Image (spheres, grey):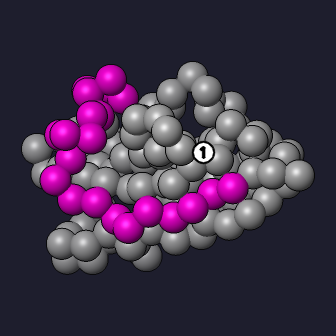
Amino acid sequence: VQLQASGGGLVQPGESLRLSCAAKGFSLDSYDIGWFRQAPGKEREGISCISSNDGSTDYVDSVKGRFTISTDRAKNTVYLQMNSLKPEDTAVYYCATDFEWTCKRGLVTMKDYVMDYWGKGTQVTVSS
């Protein structure tokens, strides 16, 4: 089981990035994916998740209306489209899953100690 996160970079405030999380060794038809981020000096926080069952999603308030999570089942990949980026979005972004967790329970249940499988982080820097 592997998750491969990519797509980070350096952008200016207001710009966009799309992060990818490719799943290897399991199907996103059956398991949900969450995105976390960790800013310098801060704890890792869950920011979004998507259900494999019905595609329902959840977002932390700070990214609602700006970030969109989606799944391409043909590519077995989850995307995080990030628009209107702000300097406070600067962080290392991770995708993760656990076979006994579901996004249907809500983002509040998506704690880093719950998740067993993690992608390598991808750095997002928003700066002018």
Q: Does residue 30 show up? A: no
Give the camera-side residue of 115 and 127. 127
- At label 1, the amino acid type is Thr
Q: Position of residue 15 (x, y in %)?
A: 83, 53
Q: Position of residue 91 (x, y in %)?
A: 57, 49
Q: Position of residue 88 (x, y in %)?
A: 68, 37
Up-down: is 97 above or below 22? above
Q: Secondary structure at mark 1?
A: strand
Q: Residue at x 84, y 46 (%)?
A: 13
Which quadrant of the figure contains the N terminus? bottom left
Q: Which residues are magenta?
A: 104-125
**What residue lies at 74% left-to-right and 63% top-to-bottom?**
10
Magenta region includes residue 65: no
In the displayed orientation, state which residue is furthest to the front: 41
Please give the name of the residue rendered at 53% of the width and 43% of the height, measured from the top-left corner: 39
- The quarter holding residue 80 reads bottom right
Task: Residue lying at the far left in this picture: please name it.
Answer: 100
Task: Residue 128 in the image: state x and y as whole percent.
Answer: 88, 52
Viewer can see residue 9: yes
Which residue bears the numbered disc 1? 68
Residue 12 drawn above or below residue 27:
above
Q: Is residue 124 magenta?
A: yes
